[in-house]
């Protein structure tokens, strides 16, 4: 049996990632997938990136927030997001990232794939066709059917919507592990999933675990970042 740890949308929330690491012992997995958005909205992008950098089994891609940070670092203008309280989080991240972590981010693709036990597994931030598409489980069935038809993958592992789910449409498995570090559903606990592959079968299990939210809140304050984020982490909701 092969075991794959599914992580995504960490958003620089290292206390949440650390709590998951303690809970499941990541070295026991054959692969550790990260569907992107390592950075922005919390203050631990360096610790977060380093956690993956030192793991040989990590399979990582970039998300939209990472791409925007890299854009700032290339000296390009940032059109989106327009809200100042969001922009400040992007610029803070770009200013505080260590060179070795910038190099690592620059080395990552925007999507990737690998094969396990005969299953071709695609890793996407949004979807196969659009990294910015938020494919929630309530999206029309026809959209899932279209993606199933257009792809050569039997398994799609996705992030971006921050909604944990597992759906099988026309024989294709769609998995979102939810967000490790920036919850939208009113439950502030960290979300992740485990995928097991054995004798031609897949099993997916989702988890929600508590972490030291106040560690995040304290550091946001120390860095003089907008108060609204402290509230968001405490209630597990998107408030801006
Ligand atoms: Fe995200």
Image (cartoon, rainbow, N blue to C red):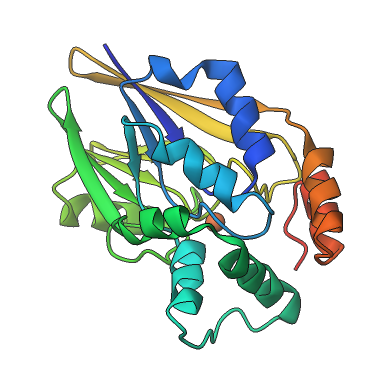
* Residue 143 drawn at (x, y percent): 34, 59
**Can see residue 17?**
yes
Q: Residue at x 53, y 57 (%)?
A: 98
Q: Position of residue 234 (x, y in %)?
A: 83, 45
* Quarter assignment of residue 220: bottom right
What residue is at 44 percent from the left and 52 percent from the top?
36
Q: Position of residue 215 (x, y in %)?
A: 80, 40
Q: Nearer the viewer, residue 24 or 52?
A: 52
Residue in the foreground of this view, choosing between 197 and 222 = 222
Does residue 166 appear left or right of residue 46 in this picture?
left
Of 31 and 193, nearer the camera is 31
Tell me if residue 125 can be seen.
no
Q: Quadrant of the C terminus?
A: bottom right
Image height check: is 22 above or below 178?
above
Q: Nearer the viewer, residue 29 or 128?
A: 29
User: Could you tell me which residue is drawn at 26 percent across and 11 percent down?
Assistant: 1
């Amino acid at each position: 049996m092969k075991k794959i740890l599914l992580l995504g949308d960490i958003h620089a929330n290292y206390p949440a990632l650390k709590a998951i690491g303690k809970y499941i012992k990541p070295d026991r997995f054959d692969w550790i997938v990260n569907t992107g958005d390592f950075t922005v909205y919390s203050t631990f992008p360096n610790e977060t990136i380093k956690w993956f950098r030192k793991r040989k089994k990590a399979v990582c891609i970039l998300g939209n927030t990472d791409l925007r940070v890299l854009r700032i670092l290339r000296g390009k203008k940032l059109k989106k997001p327009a809200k100042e309280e969001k922009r400040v989080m992007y610029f803070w991240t770009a200013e505080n990232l260590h060179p070795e972590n910038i190099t690592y981010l620059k080395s990552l693709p925007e999507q990737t794939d690998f094969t396990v036990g005969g299953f071709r597994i695609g890793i996407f931030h949004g979807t196969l066709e659009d990294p910015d598409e938020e494919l929630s489980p309530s999206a029309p069935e026809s959209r899932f059917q279209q993606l199933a038809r257009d792809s050569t993958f039997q398994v799609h592992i996705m992030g971006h919507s921050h909604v944990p789910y597992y759906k099988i449409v026309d024989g294709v498995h769609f998995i979102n592990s939810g967000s490790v570090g920036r919850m939208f559903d009113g439950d502030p606990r960290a979300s992740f999933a485990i995928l097991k592959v054995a004798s031609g079968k897949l099993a997916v299990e989702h988890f929600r675990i508590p972490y030291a939210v106040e560690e995040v809140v304290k550091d946001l304050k120390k860095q003089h970042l907008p108060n609204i984020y402290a509230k968001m982490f405490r209630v597990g909701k998107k408030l801006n």
